[in-house]
Amino acid sequence: MTGIAISHQFDPTADCVLFQGDCLDLLAQIPDEFVQLVVTSPPYNLGKPYESQLELNEYLREQRQVIEECVRALNRTGSICWQVGNYVENGEIIPLDIVLYPIFASLGLHLRNRIVWHFGHGLHASRRFSGRYEVILWFTKGNDYTFDLDAVRVPQKYPHKKYFKGPKKGQLSGHPLGKNPGDIWEIPNVKANHVEKTIHPCQFPVELIERLVLALTQEGDWVLDPFMGVGTTAVAALIHQRRAIGAEIIPEYMQIARERIALAEKGQLRIRPMQRPVYDPDTPRTTVPPQFVQIGAAPLQPALLEERHAYDVGERQE
């Protein structure tokens, strides 16, 4: 890692750029076809502390401005993953993926998957069924795009199952590295007792972004999050040897993003590991504890948030 830039100027020589300000100001500084992956969760227009609620058409107009700039900055083999939920008005839901899709289509992008992110906890509704999913729209810029399925395979349900007849009789019927995870992902959302929880009210889990980073980029690629929040995308990119760019307008969130990256540099950031199964009360002992992650493969490395020097990670404290 060569360092981190936190300013109002984009620094292409850094390995992590955290931009304090509006994402359009950052995007204007990024060269054409510079990033390999754009992955973000934009405001849902619900009046959260980090957004002003707008009339829906005005919200879509603002989203289009950002999306157009992201498409311009996206490499020809790259992907855009736009993670959204529902806009709610007078008790009626409007799925944002449906109203945003025409914007992406009009810019010539190709929808590869509509990934459903399912989680078990959230707000309880009294006049409709409680919402327990959100959607990731995965678009590519062209038909020649990066996709590494082997990097994100999950365990086979029946790993020892074999063909019982035909020319492959006796051979394993499933892929030896695991199966395709499909387009419905069951990953716990970040609530009060989640190991990654910060002050952000709509924080997404590192493992959700890890899967996208591993499948859609290669080491050294740039990953952009125009609505960075508390830095989850940057963490997921950096711990897998990618480079990260993010913009955030709220100083408190930017500070937390810096702190999380600093902890990851020292091997002291805990996350919920990708291989941890969703909790099953019938098998409570079948679990994987939170894990420490570290940026870079070597124990000694330049610090992102300090002057360039080597340091000793030291003992980890639980």
Image: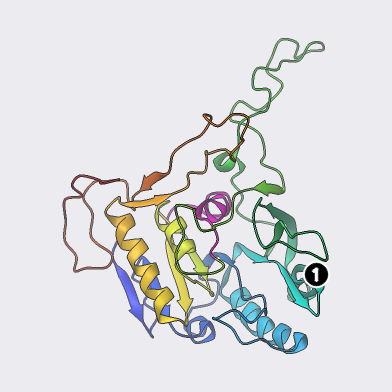
In this picture, residue 39 sits left or right of residue 143: left
How are the residues colored? Answer: rainbow
Q: Is residue 149 magenta?
A: no
Question: How far from the left and from the top, in percent, is residue 204?
Answer: 55, 61
Question: How far from the left and from the top, in percent, is residue 263?
Answer: 31, 58
Q: Amino acid at mark 1?
A: Ile
- Image-quadrant location for residue 316: top left
Q: Which residues are magenta?
A: 203-220
Residue 173 versus residue 203 in the image, above or below:
above
Q: Secondary structure of the magenta portion, mostly? A: helix
Residue 284 versus residue 44 in the image, above or below:
above
The residue pinned by badge 1 equals: 98
Report the residue at 30% width, 51% height from top: 268
In this picture, residue 128 sits left or right of residue 216: right
Report the residue at 19% width, 69% height from top: 307
Report the residue at 54% width, 85% height from top: 24
| Front in this rendered view, residue 310 or 31 | 310
Q: Quadrant of the C terminus?
A: top left
Q: Quadrant of the N terminus?
A: bottom left
| Front in this rendered view, residue 225 or 186 | 186
Residue 232 versus residue 43 in the image, above or below:
above
- Image-quadrant location for residue 281: top right
Q: Is label 1 in a helix, a strand or a loop?
A: helix
Question: How far from the left and from the top, in percent, is residue 92?
Answer: 83, 74
Question: How far from the left and from the top, in percent, is residue 121?
Answer: 64, 54
